[in-house]
Image: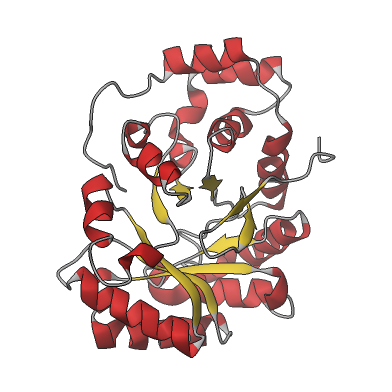
Amino acid sequence: MRDDAIPTISFPGGAEVPAIGQGTWNMGERSSEAKREIESLRTGLDLGMTLIDTAEMYAEGGAEKIVAQAIRGRRNEVFLVSKVYPWNASRKGAIEACGRSLSRLGTDRIDLYLLHWRGDHPLAETVEAFETLKVSGKIGAWGVSNFDTNDMEELLTVPAGGNVATNQVLYNLARRGVEYDLLPWCQQRQIPLMAYSPIEQGRILHHPELIRIAKAYQATPAQVALAFLLERDRVIVIPKTSSTARAAENRDAVSLDITDGDWAALDAAFPPPVRKRPLEMV
């Protein structure tokens, strides 16, 4: 299946990335797993999944250290995303936190730096810090995570808030609430949505209809779940795995060509929202 190229998505600033990347949540927590985690990320890079997403929260910086080892000698191949804790996202704190992330990542720049979720610091302060980091060359662009539609609308009212490059949210077959308003809002403004936990941490993979459809395409349930998100306009998917075999499986999800009938069957099994729902987070 790997003959199909990975589709790409462009950020507002012009950077082009693969529509499927690699997540790192839960990496860096056990030294016994480090070798497998590094090998999985390197395999993903070899397969073209060059966007790697991490955060200072993940294993309290441990995941960033895993990423540093995975991208050593290959930094220019990678589009690197990291996130700042909300309590570190003051005018001064975000700049200091970014410096610590850069040190753990072993690099002089983060391509995309996100506010992990809203906290007590005013958005204007956080955006000012992000813009300062951009000018200094320490980050290429900035965005947010776990922002609902009203949060995004408020963000656009602060100075330079319109420079937001992305919003990373929980989105998968079982968590489709963003389709009601947030996803269309972002699509209309050409702001890509990044989907984390795209297979619901494995919980949806035993659903009978997902299994049935996967078998019809000689695919895995995870591949179908990823294909569902890849079918959406301006959505970037960031599955996490510590398995080289699973990394290859994730990459091959781009080659699935699912019929309209089977998409309809998935809609019946995992209904899209018919009203506004509060933004879900994990």
Residue 173 drawn above or below residue 264: below
Residue 271 drawn above or below residue 228: above
Q: Which quarter of the figure is the N terminus placed in?
A: top right
Residue 163 drawn above or below residue 68: above
* Residue 87 visible, this orientation: no
Residue pictured at 34% horizontal, 37% vertical: 178
Residue at the left extreme of this rendering: 120
Residue 226, image quadrant: top right
Residue pictured at 51% horizontal, 67% vertical: 81
Residue pictured at 22% horizontal, 69% vertical: 123
Residue 244, horizontal then vertical, whole percent: 71, 52
* Residue 125 visible, this orientation: yes
Classify residue 262 as left or right of residue 101: right
The chosen color scheme is: secondary structure
Residue 254, horizontal then vertical, whole percent: 69, 37
Front position in the image: 126 or 93:
126
Residue 31, horizontal then vertical, whole percent: 54, 71
Classify residue 64 as left or right of residue 163: right
The total of numbered circles placed on residues is: 0
Residue 93 drawn above or below residue 222: below
Residue 44, horizontal then vertical, whole percent: 70, 56
Residue 175, image quadrant: top left
